[in-house]
Image: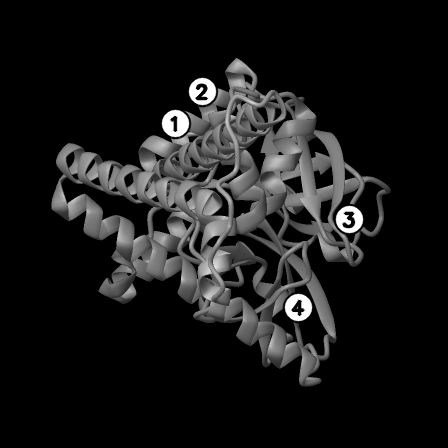
Amino acid sequence: MDDILLLEEVESYLRGEMTPEEKNLFERRRKNDAELDQLVVEHTYFLQGMETFGSIKTFKHSLTEVEAQLISEGLIGLTPLNGKAKIIFLWKKHKRNIAVAASIAGFISILASGILVTYTRKFGNENYRVLVDQLNKTNREVNKLKSKDAIENAGIEKPEVDFRATGFLIDGKGYLITNAHVISRMKNIYIENRKGDFYKAVALYSDKEVDLAILKITDTTFKAVGNLPFSIKKGNSELGEQFFTLGFPRNEIVYGEGYLSAESGSDGDSSAYQLNVSANPGNSGGPVINGKGEIIGIITAKDAKADGVVYAAKSRNILTLLDKLKKMDDQYQVIKTPNKTDLKKLDRVHQVKKMEEYVFMVVGN
């Protein structure tokens, strides 16, 4: 998620502006995401500091008004200025403001020290170091963004694209699923999100029989995602089950909806479903999601002889491919597919909004 949008979400949570449903979902994410929890803690202290600063500023303004009223009523007077030296003159003219400023500065210093001591005692030195490390990490991320802008401003162009399809994350660390026939035509593979950011990717494993391939984003600029909000269904879906799709038949994400029209694919293929839904070539590799927020299939092909007939590989094929990849190379044992869904209790509009973050355009040349 974009850092600004995430910060807005944190502020909405802290200010109590979320609905009960959104609050429960956010707190579940916070529990499972240490970085998000740390951001909430840091922003809480930041907002408290801003509130304290506002209170001090209001208090100073009140003191100034009281002083002006007392002078106007003749209850206090200004000390006559007898000094001839300029420094002495300025000191006598502004000493009241200097004294007030010094007092406020001292108060802020003591307050800041108190907050620091309280935080350290409450959370321990280790958590204090974590806070400092998080601040340093934020600075590094800002520098990365600046570097990215500098590169774009330097005139480096986005890659030329000959083919386009769809893919989606199956692990937040940058592992995606798409069609095997898509990447078979690509020498160079890139992943583009809905904001137009490109990332280099490589194919780890593909199976032409079920027409699926596992990709890995290799760019270090890609930021890993904590918890995916959907799950991958292991069993079969029922005839007539409603679903929706997301894909890139053009240069923006497109929504579609339909129903499962047959429990097997073309020529009775038991590893696939037949769907009744509108789809175009760029939809290949897109997720098929039921109302519970479960991935039930991956779009693979459109029937050229029948309008609205589409085929999709069953979701259990994802797990089979992963098992084969892990047996081939132990380093991929770290891949963990999502097994819980946060989409179940959301309406369709919010389900789509959540899913958009995890569906990518797969492009290449």
Image location (x, y in percent) of residue 110? 26, 40
Residue corresponding to mark 4? 363
Q: Earlier in the sequence, mark 4 or mark 2?
A: 2
Q: Residue 119 vs residue 344: left or right?
A: left
Amino acid type, callout 2: Asn
Considering only vertical position in the picture, is 275 above or below 199? Answer: above
Residue 337 appears in the figure: no
**Do residues under tags 1 and 2 come within 8 Å of each other at their CB atoms?**
yes
The residue under the point 78% across, 58% down is 251
Considering only vertical position in the picture, is 221 above or below 333? Answer: below
The residue under the point 55% across, 71% down is 146
Q: Which mark is residue 303?
A: 3
Which of pointers 3 and 1 indicates the residue nearer the eye?
1
Q: Residue 28 carries which label?
A: 1
Which SS class for mark 4? Answer: strand
Where is the C terminus found, in terms of image quarters? bottom right
Of 84 and 286, nearer the camera is 84
Amino acid type, callout 3: Asp
Q: How busy is the neighbourhood of tag 4: few (under 14 within 10 Å), some, or many (20 plus)? A: many
Q: How busy is the neighbourhood of tag 2: few (under 14 within 10 Å), some, or many (20 plus)? A: few
Q: Distance between the residues labelled 4 and 3?
A: 23 Å
Residue corresponding to mark 2? 24
Q: Which of marks 1 and 4 is nearer the N terminus?
A: 1
Q: Residue 113 vs residue 231: left or right?
A: left
| Residue at the top extreme, as displayed | 20
Image location (x, y in percent) of residue 351? 62, 30
